[in-house]
Image (cartoon, grey):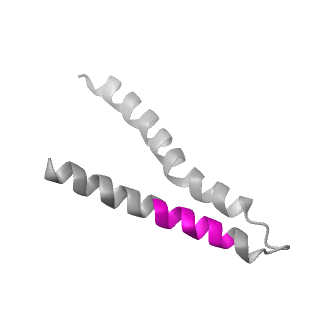
């Protein structure tokens, strides 16, 4: 691959990676309404994070044992 194509692809992938990496946190923070802070909303968000963490660990362990 020549250097010009590599740099174009690298810059494009850098922007896509940055968006994918930062936007979920941005929208999660934006979705929380701090004026009417409902503790149950925070619990649902925390429960969702815990479930995602458990699923990731489960599937990683399942892949390693195969």
Which residue sits at x=27%, y=54%?
Answer: 60
Quarter holding residue 10: top left
Based on the picture, tell me whether residue 8 belongs to the magenta stretch. no
Q: Is residue 59 above or below residue 48?
A: above
Which residue sits at x=79%, y=67%?
Answer: 33
In the rendered picture of this protein, how many numbered marks are placed on residues?
0
Which residue sits at x=58%, y=59%?
Answer: 25
Percent across and percent down for residue 20 are: 51, 46
Q: Residue furthest right?
A: 35
In the shown orientation, is residue 43 left or right of residue 2?
right
Q: Is residue 14 above or below residue 64?
A: above
1 or 37: nearer the eye? 37
Percent across and percent down for residue 32 are: 73, 65
Q: Is residue 14 above or below residue 46?
A: above
* Segment tinted magenta in the rendering: 42-51
Quarter holding residue 8: top left
Based on the picture, tell me whether residue 49 belongs to the magenta stretch. yes
Magenta-colored segment: predominant secondary structure: helix
Quadrant holding the N terminus: top left
Percent across and percent down for residue 22 are: 54, 54
Which residue sits at x=15%, y=53%?
Answer: 65
């Amino acid at each position: 691959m020549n250097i010009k194509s590599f740099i174009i692809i690298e810059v494009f992938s850098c922007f896509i990676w940055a968006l994918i990496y930062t936007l979920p946190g941005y929208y999660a923070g934006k979705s929380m309404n701090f004026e009417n802070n409902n503790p149950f909303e925070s619990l649902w968000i925390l429960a969702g994070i815990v479930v995602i963490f458990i699923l990731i660990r489960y599937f990683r362990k399942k892949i390693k044992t195969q």
